[in-house]
Amino acid sequence: MEQLKIDNDVINHLLFHKSLIDENDDATRINYYVEMLQKTNEGEHISIENPFERSITIAFELVMRQHLDPWDIDLVNFSTMYIKRAKEEKIDLITAGRIILMAWKILKLQSDNLVVSVEENQENEEIFDWNNLPTEMWLENDQDYSYTNLIMKMPEPPLYEPVRRDSKRKVTLIELLEAFNQARTESEEYQFLEQQRHEERERLRIKSRKDMKEKYEKAKSEEDVEAIWKKIHNLNKKTVSIIDLCDTKNRDEFIKTLISVLFLAYDNKIKVYQRKFPYGKIFIENMGYT
Amino acid sequence: MGKNEKRRVESVLFSASEPVRIKDIRESTGFSIKIVKDTLKELMDDYSINRKNDTSMEIVKAGEKYIMQLKKNYTDQSMIVSKPEIKDDILKTLSLIAFHQPVKQSNLRRMAGQKIYDHVDELVSMKIVNTRKHGSTELLTTTKLFPEYFGIESTKPEEIRDYLAKKVMGDISKSIKSD
Amino acid sequence: MGKNEKRRVESVLFSASEPVRIKDIRESTGFSIKIVKDTLKELMDDYSINRKNDTSMEIVKAGEKYIMQLKKNYTDQSMIVSKPEIKDDILKTLSLIAFHQPVKQSNLRRMAGQKIYDHVDELVSMKIVNTRKHGSTELLTTTKLFPEYFGIESTKPEEIRDYLAKKVMGDISKSIKSD
């Protein structure tokens, strides 16, 4: 593997992090990382047996090789690159996932926390030194001071937006043909994907029907169906609601009733419908009622 | 006209980037119609006669409007740096319409997805695509402007279609050969 | 350079709506880098010195790129299409950032008040200003687009700073420096 010239930013980042952790906290882990990175920096080849630590090394390598800002890792991007690397290095993906989370914590989350603590310190400092601040801290010399003052007082800014042409030319035939070529390919891909989506939807529909039927077969019990049918019959109405047949808050009872109702509908003894789909009341019409 | 008038009218023409009416120039400069007209005449002469070899631009009358543009012999090398007026995505949709015309908007959607609705709107507003009701959907064709725009001789849909097909297939076979 | 070279480079600059690199001009014209550079130099002189009063345009170096634009004193009355996009207040904030860069957002707030937060957001979204976390605050700098956008030749912070100081304080800054 190509030796890496370690970006000092990353080491500094870790040291900064270390300098800010509570004295009671254990800094061993960070010390280990720093040591490991320094060794790599000096060209030493480190063979790491422990898959967990090897994973961490890869995380750091990625940050450095891609010149990522250790203060600001784009996690989505980082994860994609990391998973790819992890696959290449044959690190199992569960460990890799844990590492991403950890790398993220080290590189981002913890630094955010640190930022908060630095912020608190600075805010305190600010209040403390407020009287001395204005000229000394950030307007270090006369020129800075005059410039800033003048800008604030001047009616017009020293910058102006120049006027340029917004020139557009006509599309050429070659460009049209190129567009056509691309459009054709994209359209083929689009239609292929649409077709696949359609087939997948159809497959799922058939599967869920089949599943439903199997579940239904399993769940239905002749006695339950008979009991519900009796209930409907005894209510002596053309149309009843499912609420009349069971305690809908009792999940088991509700499912049992619903399945029996569906079975009775399947047998054409009743009709089941809703006025409002999908959350409306479920009505049951007794087909035998006269 | 004085130099000041010339410079101010020139600056309007330069920044407009598209043909402008005398009225527009009057409004932004505050000059009278007569001054604007006279100044335009002098500017046109300056660019095309007096300083003919000292500028690659010209000011010309286009219908009732005026525009500053490149002289014809300098247009070629500006190709790389200037942007086409129809964006890539919209151009793709246009090419599909040109090839499949007359094509139902709903079929076009099936070929390329939802985005085509916006594209068709824009192409219609450019007057390069025509739409007419056909049952519950729209039937799309290219207009007379299409062959004019792309310098295609034919105006008949079938011939445009053949032309595009031949050109694209030609390109493909060329690229296959060169591989 | 011959007239032909000048005209051809000029035509590229005229048709570009964004600043172009020397490389782009070379590609469009086929001239060598040296010829492009020399021609640019002569054209800039023609527009700004030799024919100063005979044109309302100028050719300027904007960062590492070149562009044709209106001279400042013609920008106001030429507005038919293009209007200034950035408000004066925001331009002031930007001129503070450009001068003091890299500057902490908290210090900028002390110079110009709360409103700078909105201004910074807008400038960042326009990609003219870059922000980077620095401890508890943001550190602000101008981006590469800054000199291109405003037609400023300098790309280095110190040079931008000098440019602005000269604009705002004129000779005052010189006398301070020489002290």
Image (cartoon, coloured by chain):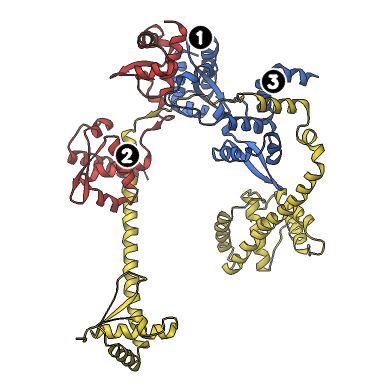
Chain colours: A yellow, B red, C blue
Q: Amino acid at mark 3?
A: Met
Disc 1 marks which residue?
C53
Query: Quick check: A248 above or below C117?
Result: below
Q: Earlier in the sequence, mark 1 or mark 3?
A: 1
Identify the image quadrant of the C terminus of chain A.
bottom left
Label 1 amino acid?
Asn
Does residue C133 appear anywhere in the picture?
yes
Label 1 vs label 3: CA separation? Answer: 27 Å
Q: Residues within 10 Å of mark 1 (few under 14, many from 20)?
A: few
Q: Which mark is residue C169?
A: 3
Alpha carbon of mark 2 to alpha carbon of mark 1: how far? 42 Å
- Report which residue position mark 2 lands on: B122
* A97 or B64, nearer to the observer: B64
Q: Secondary structure at mark 3?
A: helix
Residue A188, percent from left and from top? 31, 53
> Quick check: C166 left or right of A255?
right
- In the rendered structure, the answer to whether residue B6 lies left or right of residue A198 reads right
Q: Which percent across, then down, holds residue A222?
A: 32, 93
Q: Secondary structure at mark 1?
A: helix
Look at discs 1 and 3 and give the one toward the viewer.
3
Q: Are marks 2 and 1 on the same chain?
A: no
Element type at mark 2: helix
- Pick whichever, A106 or A242, lies toward us: A242
The reply to whether callout 2 and callout 3 are in contact (CB within 8 Å) is no
Three-letter amino acid code of the residue under disc 2: Glu
Chain letter behind tag 3? C
Let me know if residue B176 appears in the view. no
Q: Quadrant of residue A287?
A: bottom left
Task: Report the chain holding disc 2.
Answer: B
Mark 3: few/some/many CA within 10 Å (<14, 14-19, 20+): some
Q: Nearer the viewer, residue B73 or C175?
A: C175
